[in-house]
Amino acid sequence: MGPDVPILATVFSPLSTAVKLASRDAVFARIKSEPGVVHALLRTLTETEKAYVAAVLDAGADGLFYATQLCGARAISDADHETFNKPYDLEVLSVLRGKSAISLLHLHGDDLSFARFFDYALPLVNWHDRRTSPRLLEGRLQWTHGAVCGGLDESNTLLTAPPKVAATDVKAMLHQSDGMRHILTPGCVLPMSVLDDVLDAVRGAVEG
C-alpha cells in the first residue's frame, strides 16, 4: 500500500457489540425487562469506542469502517433503533468530526431499512446490494452524503463463476453506475475461498 491508500479502522456499533458479547436474545430480553441496564451497558461501550476512535485517528487512521449488524425490521424495531441504536451510533461517529474526511458505514445483513441511516452522514455507505434492496443505483440516489460502495457479488458470482464471467459481471455493474459516486466493493468481506484468478479478473475488468 502507498500513501494514497486510506486506512479505515473497523468499529462495530455499541449495540452490535453488546449483542456479540451477550447474544441478541439476552440483550433484547433486557431491553424489554430492564432498559436501564441496557442503556448503562451501551453508555460504557460508547465511551470505550469513542476513546478507541480518537486513539486510532491519532495513530494515523484516515477514518472508520463503521459496521452495524442491526439494520432491519427483523433485527430491531423502529422504536428500539431510535432508542438503543441510533443515539449511541451518532455519538461514536461524532468523534470523526473535523478529524476524518473519509469513513464508511457498513450496513450488514439481508434485512435492511436503508432510510433509518440517512442521518448518519458518512461519505461512503456499503451494504449487500446484490442480495437485498435497495439495489446499487437506487441506493446511490438515496444516499446524499457521498458515494456508494458495492456491486461485487461476493456470495455467488465471485465464489462460483469462472474468472471471465466474474469480469463480465463487474463490467456490467460499472457500466450501470458509469463510475459516478460508486466505488466497486463486495457487499461484505470477501470469503477466503474466492480464487486469486477471479480477483485478478475483477481487477482487470476495472483497469481495462
Image (cartoon, rainbow, N blue to C red):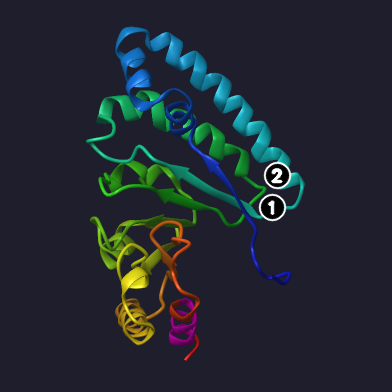
Circle 2: element type: helix
- Label at residue 56: 2
Residue closest to the eye, 91 or 45: 45
Image: magenta residue range:
199-206
Q: Residue at x 47, y 81 (%)?
A: 197
Could you tell me the amino acid type at mark 2? Val
Give the quadrant of the N terminus.
bottom right
Residue closest to the eye, 24 or 108: 24
Q: Dots 2 and 1: beta carbons under 8 Å?
A: yes
Residue 59 lies, in percent from the top left, at 77, 47
Residue 11 horizontal side relative to residue 134, left or right: right
Residue 77 lies, in percent from the top left, at 25, 29
Residue 100 horizontal side relative to residue 154, left or right: right
**If you read the primary sequence from the N terminus, does the residue marked by circle 2 or circle 1 appear first?**
2
Q: Residues within 10 Å of mark 2 (few under 14, many from 20)?
A: some
Residue furthest out toward the right = 59
Q: Disc 2 and disc 1: Cα gap in Å?
A: 6 Å
- Residue under numbered circle 1: 61
Could you tell me the amino acid type at mark 1? Ala
Residue 173's quadrant in the figure? bottom left
Circle 1: element type: loop
